[in-house]
Amino acid sequence: MADSPSLLAALAAIVGDAHVLTRPDDTAPYVADWRGHYPGIARAVVRPADTGQVARVVRLCAEAGVPLVPQGGNTGLVGGSTPDDSGREVVVSLGRMTAVRRVDPLGNSMTLEAGCTVLAAQAAARECGKLFPLSLASEGSATIGGVVSTNAGGEQVLRYGNTRELTLGLEVVLADGRVLDALTTLRKDNTGYDLKQLFIGSEGTLGIVTAAAFKLFPQPRRTVTGWVALTDPQAAVDLLAMLTDAVGERVTAFELLGREALDQVLAHPLEGMRDPLAGGYPWAVLFDVSETSARMDPAEAVEEVLGMALERGLAIDAALAASGRQAQEFWALREHVPEAQRLHGPSLKHDISVPIASIPAFIETAGAALARALPGIRIVCFGHVGDGNLHYNQSKPPGMDDKAFRARAPEIHDIVHGIAADMHGSISAEHGIGRLKQDAFLRHKAPLALDLMASLKAAFDPRGVFNPGRILPPSRP
Amino acid sequence: MADSPSLLAALAAIVGDAHVLTRPDDTAPYVADWRGHYPGIARAVVRPADTGQVARVVRLCAEAGVPLVPQGGNTGLVGGSTPDDSGREVVVSLGRMTAVRRVDPLGNSMTLEAGCTVLAAQAAARECGKLFPLSLASEGSATIGGVVSTNAGGEQVLRYGNTRELTLGLEVVLADGRVLDALTTLRKDNTGYDLKQLFIGSEGTLGIVTAAAFKLFPQPRRTVTGWVALTDPQAAVDLLAMLTDAVGERVTAFELLGREALDQVLAHPLEGMRDPLAGGYPWAVLFDVSETSARMDPAEAVEEVLGMALERGLAIDAALAASGRQAQEFWALREHVPEAQRLHGPSLKHDISVPIASIPAFIETAGAALARALPGIRIVCFGHVGDGNLHYNQSKPPGMDDKAFRARAPEIHDIVHGIAADMHGSISAEHGIGRLKQDAFLRHKAPLALDLMASLKAAFDPRGVFNPGRILPPSRP
């Protein structure tokens, strides 16, 4: 069975000939990540139609000793959802399983299959007057199975939590092909260990998520969106505290942008993009305050806070979006940062988190250390201040050779990760480990935690069928 | 070492003579649950002063093959925190470890030791202007280690989530005495499997929680408390939907009380207790709507909803608490239900959850089935409608012998649990399994889920040191 022709025939017998892809043209979208950092080779790409087919595929491959790489929208950033270059791995794409199984507005829950996109999930919730609050730049392609497996974060974590906190239940195919039905929508269920937690954020290494049930929330009726110019990151932290004091958990997003990030966006603008405020201020904050009650309006409270911030010299200038369209323009600036940085040249990316109070010290310490290591390096800093999560990226010094800059990557990563770790932070706040961050993960995670993770992997996937070598190194034979 | 004198001497060498209790007078508070259903015998009660001592106690007992029963405030309802009657088990009480290690108002987090009470935790948060939202009847005695180990729920889960959702990090002593430091306060950290989840809600069977870090929230500035008379449970579900539509996630608590529950309270009242509304209505709802912004007041929106509910015939009558004192009086009625039922005679207790939309059907179906099984049985139904969680209890028919009533318990439990399970509900929404609910747990949980739980137990506690026989049956040798 381990020889390819009979394996492929057996896979085709489960999912149909049309859904076992082997020609390079057909497999191309599945074998490399979208940034092109991890070009791989798949023995085959299999596209099952339902949970039963996933289970049969897993059982077949497990028995044949063929490793499987589960894949959703393939929007990951850490090489966790594409095959390696051995040609041994079979990609299991959940892309055909897109059903919205059930929406329960009274119970504030929704059950979806793994291949449903985040955008489609948002739409299904909206149709019944509810909010599915997961929101991230890749939401048009990212799928439910992917966001669960990576515990995706995004822009509204401050108010609604990570994917883990949105997840009520899961359906999971295990490494021996058995199907765990933990697809509950209950808010309270203390009957033994909460098994679903194991599969959330484990990047497809412990099981294949085939469906998930999520919490839904009241739909916001009004959103106040603001853009504030600030002198330094400490002012951002202080402004967040003031805003939270004034409007409580209505603060839904609170994003920081450094000048370099904004300058890169304005140097590679999409149509109509412009700086909302004049003066070349060093830092900006973009925030949303949203209100779910039609009877209340937080605008006045927000204006009062901004007035106080200006008066105290905490803010240099501030603008509230006058319309939904203007709010979208503010957000477009923020969302264009990664693409602008790509257009600007090679970039080094980090996705760190630190306790919120340590954000200013992190930015100062890391900036100084990088300037010493590579004078002229550009810091492209933006991220979710409310969660302590910064995308702390770098562009090369003006005039430096691309290749020479890329060669410095390991050293730059070590500096940034080391400073985050020293501040009790994380080297991967929301992107996960995959293959890209395994070295840093092994270096910074406590040995005892690594031991326990290896025990879990051994208990749930003793033969190493699922995504071997991702997160943890391949287990010793 | 397994013989008692040398074991006791070795324990005393770790925690000090004064903290190894063996005399029945000294161990009495630790060896039985507060309801007196599980009188046990401890080989000793050990009271370590810090995490290092806990680790040494665990290592010693693991090596000697002595089972350990971790204990917090001993307020549990399922026999999970007291020793059995074998005299073999050592109770590890965390009661001396009461430190508030750190409160970080800017980062909205707080780190506490396991023996700190929930009430003390609430106070520590309040002192820095924040809210620790866990709130339950036993909060004066229940401890942090206990609420984490049982994933406690309580009265504000609707808005703030269970203990699991409040927990950011944990410190845990493992079965071999190693200490897992996962005591982070980060909101986002996707570096491998989220190990802390395993210890939340596992009732001390996988590790001993010695400290925990929690989320804090903005303190509510105003709370609107209402008492509404209703004709049936469907009206409660409808009213919840209307209220949520009007004020969003400000609905902080939404409790249902059946007439029998209220009558028992009024038959055994504390000083000054009276029915907030006249007319002997069959069902009541008690709700809190709380607002964290000092600048906004939801009272008008709540009044409007109640007006609509009265107009549509959904509500029979309604009262808003005119003062904080009156709000406390409303809540005292709700909180007095368990004690009133105890004074009323023997009671059978259930802690089920079902999807919110199924609450009316559950109450109708279970009520009819119980009336058939035992004509005249009294249904004492109250609970957290917003979470689908009902404390669906029974008192004996008038005139029935106590013992004869108790003898029917297994049959009554089966009926209630069976109906909840048929409705995709849970047989234990917030109280856990312990020893009391193990039979029902084994009967209603999927065999695959039980298998996976047994693998976790085997991976984390291969020698069965921690709380053997609780949740899962003792492992076969």
Image (spheres, coloured by chain):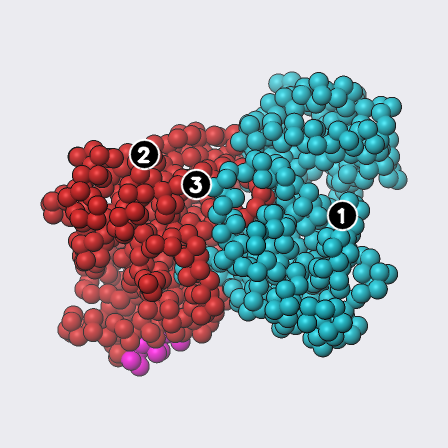
Chain colours: A cyan, B red
| N-terminal-most mark, 3 or 2 | 2
Dot 3: what SS? strand
Give the position of the C terminus of chain A as an image quadrant.
Answer: bottom right
Residue A127 image position (x, y, % from top left): 68, 61
Inspect the image, locate mark 2, and give the three-letter code of the amino acid beneath it. Asp
Tell whether label 2 touches label 3 (CB within 8 Å). Answer: no
Q: Is residue B189 left or right of residue B165?
A: right
User: Can residue B255 be seen in the rendering of this structure?
Assistant: no
Question: Furthest-front residue in view?
Answer: A477
Could you say which quadrant of the image residue B103 lies in? top left
Inspect the image, locate mark 1, and give the three-letter code of the amino acid beneath it. Tyr
Marks 2, 1: nearer the viewer:
1
Q: Is residue A218 depicted above or below A319 in this figure?
A: below
Residue identifier under label 2: B50
Tell me which secondary structure the magenta stretch mostly adopts: helix
- Of residues A104 and B253, the one nearer the viewer is A104
Is B369 part of what is drawn in magenta? yes
- Of residues A1 and A45, the one nearer the viewer is A1
Callouts 3 and 2 in the same chain: yes
- Of residues A180 and B220, the one nearer the viewer is A180
Q: Is residue A317 depicted above or below A329 in this figure?
A: above
Residue identifier under label 1: A38
- Residue ID at (40%, 56%): B457
- Tell me the subunit letter for badge 2: B
Q: Is residue B56 left or right of residue A74?
A: left
Residue identifier under label 3: B180
Tell whether label 3 touches label 1 (CB within 8 Å). Answer: no
- Residue ID at (33%, 74%): B414
Q: Is residue B313 depicted above or below B467 in this figure?
A: below
Inspect the image, locate mark 3, and give the three-letter code of the amino acid beneath it. Leu
